[in-house]
Image (spheres, rainbow, N blue to C red):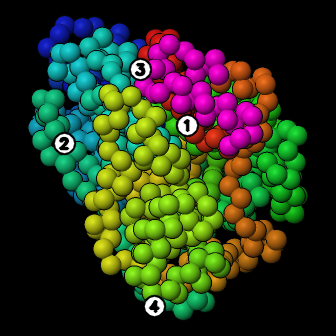
Amino acid sequence: MCGIVGYMPGNKEIDHEAVIKDMCDAMVHRGPDSDGTFITDQIVLGFRRLSIIDLSNEADQPLFNKDKTLALIFNGEIYNYKELREDLVKQGYTFISETDSEVLVHGYDAWGEGILHKVRGMFAFAIWDAKKEELFLARDFFGIKPLYYGAASDDGSFFFGSEIKCFLEHPSFRKAVNPKALRPYLTFQYPATEETFFKGIYKLSPGTWMRVKDGKITDRGRYWDFNYRDAGLTDDEAVTAIGDVLRESVRYHQMADVQVGAFLSGGIDSSFITALFRPEKTFSVGFKDYDGVFNETDLGRRLSEILGFTHYKRLISGDDFFEALPTIQYHMDEPQSNLSSVPLYFLAQLASEHVKVVLSGEGADELFGGYDSYMDTPHLALYKKLPAFVRRGLYQTVGKAFPHSRLGDLAIRGGQPLRERFVGQARIFPDDEAAALLTPTYRGGPSATELLAPEYDRLHGTDELTAKQVIDIRTWLPGDILLKADKMSSAHSLELRVPFLDKEVIHLATQLSPDQRVRDGVAKVSLRKAALAELPEEWAKRPKVGFPVPLRDWLCQEKYYQAVKAIFERPYVSEFFNQDKLLTYLQEHYEGKAMRQRYIYTVLCFLIWYDEYFVKR
């Protein structure tokens, strides 16, 4: 893991050497080991390095091709770099280092954008082509590594890099809140639009590339995509294949010249990866005073004892949680209110005290069908046996009249079209409530349904389980899960690797039939069977718990209630929200009249983010 940043200069005279140094320093946490720059009249590149493969100075970036007409800055890991290197050596290319990074610059020289079809790994990189006077940007298949870009400047400068906060160090950067980002955020809990919360700054989509010339985007394309297609595997064939492909992926992902550990909760995903990996050290976190409910550290410790690892754990208090929020939102770059980001922040901090790289279990739920929302409850399964026209009628009457009752919820889930009721794993504010809470200036962003309409259009005729998984892989996974994984690990100069998110693993996962993913109320059914070969039955069959946080209880405590209230009463809050309604939500929760913790926390994270980037700075 490293950090990249750069810009194509505009029409103002500035000290590029000083500016790029400040931009790099803003992300020193991503790469404290070394830095590097490359400056010409047409391009300025900056790099911060976390040394993982080839710890020598020869592996420092930027890296160049033989005649120095191509300059590379790269964040990530290329796991099949040794095979690619052999191919390139046979073609006559000479390498000056043993790093994986160098295969990208020579590979681009040899194959152009075709290098993207050959690599296996996680990456965001930029290559400056001096001959064509052109910039090439690319992001990995799933969006494991972030890459931002845009021309939000007063002088025509075009920015790109791993973190938005770096752009703020440029004297021509034009900082403004994107008014269309807040409405969908309230529903999704993460920044869901292509344009970020910083107006004029965008995210490069996973699996895509872009070319830029003279500060203008000249071409862009998608080099990778996926579709679920049942390959007709028997159950035994599916289970064997899952074990084989994950074993290979873990072998690739553990390659490093530094020590590698593993995150280990009590769930099947991290447990399976850890059992295949067999690291020396594992890590987990939980919450003080909530043993058995919000604390799985004992499960991680027990499995480590069984398999022979050294386990480290930390327990987090309510004070720890709330005190960390400003730092967490600063590192996120954009507001994000997934509660699990906070324990992940502390987990990465703990691991960074012992290792430089960790393996983690992100992606298994999306690929193999692990979320509860992918399954029907027994009552819903029975209800769906009614004719579709009957269910649609009950949705229009009972569901809309009594949306918060059990009967109304059943009518909605059984009769409402999928594209209206499923927007991914997080649905905090219903759209009407989000719009009602916002002031007119910030009410104009797209609704969750509008944002996902193009995805659902492409999924016409797909079964419901597969449609939900595809929606999550395209939106929730890069927008929430991988965003927090990257930002929280990089905050502590820790590289986080995700063996489930390997292109060969998804190639297999997409060949499974729906009932090889979810069957008879069992999620990840084939993955669980594969895990039995490596794990005790107790772990292989453990139901999904997630990373639960005792926020509901904390917000009923006077100390935390008053702290949040003080933030909600700040004068600038009324620019964005109906302040009275917001304070009512908080009061209702505090008095036990309603459970509003997710509403409160989602708004709180936005306000803390705004304070970090627009009030303090």
Sequence order check: which comes first, mark 1 or mark 2? 2
Q: Which residue is mark 1?
A: 602
Neighbor class of circle 4 (other Cα within 10 Å; few <14, some 14-19, many 20+) is: few
Disc 4 to disc 1: CB gap under 8 Å: no
Residue visible at 39% across and 28% down in the picture = 439
Left or right of 456 on screen, residue 286: right
Expressed as whole percent of the image width and height from the top left, the position of residue 384 reads 52, 82
Residue 570, magenta (yes or no): yes
Which residue type carries mark 3? Glu
Residue visible at 61% across and 61% down in the picture = 405
Q: Nearer the viewer, mark 3 or mark 2?
A: 3
Expressed as whole percent of the image width and height from the top left, the position of residue 485 reads 56, 44
Magenta segment range? Answer: 565-594
Q: Which residue is mark 3?
A: 575
Q: Which residue is mark 4?
A: 232
The kind of secondary structure element at disc 1 is: helix
The kind of secondary structure element at disc 4 is: loop
How far is the residue under mark 3 from the one under mark 4? 56 Å
Q: Which residue is mark 2?
A: 211
Sequence order check: which comes first, mark 3 or mark 1? 3
Task: Using the rendered image of the protein, determine whether residue 612 is visible from the camera's viewpoint.
Answer: yes
How far is the residue under mark 3 from the one under mark 1? 17 Å
Note whether 222 is above or below 504 in the view shown.
Answer: above
How far is the residue under mark 3 from the one under mark 2? 38 Å
Front-lying residue, 115 or 577: 577
Which residue type carries mark 1? Thr
Disc on res. 222: none
Which residue type carries mark 2? Arg
